[in-house]
Amino acid sequence: MNVVRLGIVGLGNMGAIHADSVLAGKIRGLKLAAVCDNNASRLGRYQGISRFASADAMIAAGVIDAILIATPHYYHVPIGAAALRAGMHVLVEKPISVHKADGERLVAAHQGRRQVFAAMFNQRTDPLYQKIRAIIQGGELGEVRRINWIITDWFRTEAYYASGGWRATWAGEGGGILLNQCPHNLDLLQWIFGQPQRVRAFCRFGRYHDIEVEDDVTAYMEFSNGASGVLITSTGEAPGTNRLEITAEGGRVVCEDSRILLTRNAVPMSEFSRKASQAFARPETTVSSIAFPDHGGQHNEVLQNFADAILDDRPLIAPAAEGLRSVELANAMLLSTWLHKTVELPLDGVAFAGMLEQQIKNSRFIKKTVSTATNEDFTKSFGR
Ligand SMILES: NC(=O)c1ccc[n+]([C@@H]2O[C@H](COP(=O)([O-])OP(=O)(O)OC[C@H]3O[C@@H](n4cnc5c(N)ncnc54)[C@H](O)[C@@H]3O)[C@@H](O)[C@H]2O)c1
């Protein structure tokens, strides 16, 4: 094979952008062979390309080798699992699933390494996050002690939430900022620092918007080496902040405004504390600053990587199975809020699915504006 015949399912905000990139020839080795959307009005502009109203029909037609899933999240699992079982390569949008148990069903359908199964974690292509990961995992600052990430620049208006019937409802989306915007940050968090061991979170539901799910989260995390972390995120604050601060034995990293400010301690802080004879002494420091004006290839780089993995056996930027961790973290933050207690990881995915199902059953929320997207019965997502 020297060209991958790609089918895209879901041609809304994100799917249409992916389709345009492939149609514009921006991705070597990918050809847009089919498109699918259950809203017929979304298909009209793709003249000359096989068009389908259902993913099952597109998968069965024999016209594609690979599928990109850009539907609302709950559909990622049934469509992804069907495509994997049919032997296709799969690229799934984030989050890979709404909840952990569902994500595990998706990952279980993966048939092995020759079948490429990737997730669209485009922020992994940002040189700034790659640099932070290299600093932390390369060990040049020693043990991490504290992580603070304020990521409140995901501002969204009421019009955004009203733009889709599925958005910001338990039945249609399964959560709010933790499921839609923040999966990128939760993925980067675990990609750089590893998965926390326990989480205590305070989600506020509809704090800033007329929605039933969380649009404001403060989460405290503990990691296996004793490091602690706080993540604060919201879609309601303008102008918002994106500031990641890492305290490690060997110094501090502050990442804000596309810049990393790296302060190195001449002596690791605990060692200095033990050895210093003066009560208020501090280690000598050196400071360097690196600007990152370029944020990498983002979505198109992940698309290119997907094609390269299929055609040339290149390693994936984001294997889909790794997407389970950000789903687990998001689920843990919701569960901790609902139970008013600290949640240990690994999370009990079945218990979480049960609680989410209760939220759906108990919901009395009525969306004021509903788009043409269908609302389906998602009970299969709970393994029934
Ligand atoms: N990686 C990113 O940066 C990024 C950015 C935006 C959205 N996303 C993800 O992309 C997905 C879609 O988000 P969006 O904002 O494009 O949503 P959207 O509502 O704009 O588009 C979804 C599309 O899917 C179609 N659809 C719904 N159910 C379908 C089904 N069963 N079969 C076929 N088509 C179906 C809808 O008709 C609609 O056209 C979400 O999972 C979201 O998290 C990722």
Image (cartoon, grey):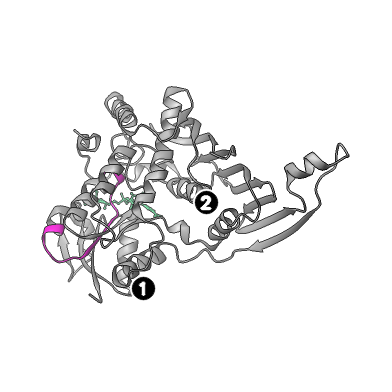
Whether the magenta-drawn stretch holds residue 73 is answered as yes
Whether the magenta-drawn stretch holds residue 377 is answered as no
Density class for disc 1 (Cα within 10 Å; few <14, some 14-19, many ≥20) is some
Q: Is residue 91 left or right of residue 52?
A: right
Element type where label 2 sits in the image: helix
Depicted 246 relative to depicted 357: above or below: below
Depicted 315 relative to depicted 336: above or below: below
Amino acid type of the residue tagged 2 in the rendering: Ile
Magenta region, residue range: 59-75
Q: Position of residue 384 (x, y in %)?
A: 18, 33
Residue drawn at (54%, 40%) of the image: 231
Query: According to the image, label 2 marks what residue?
Result: 192
Depicted 184 relative to depicted 331: above or below: below
Depicted 198 relative to depicted 48: above or below: above
Query: According to the image, label 1 marks what residue?
Result: 26
Q: Position of residue 76 (x, y in %)?
A: 27, 48
Q: Is residue 328 left or right of residue 134?
A: left
Quadrant assignment, res 98:
top left
Q: Is residue 232 left or right of residue 306?
A: right
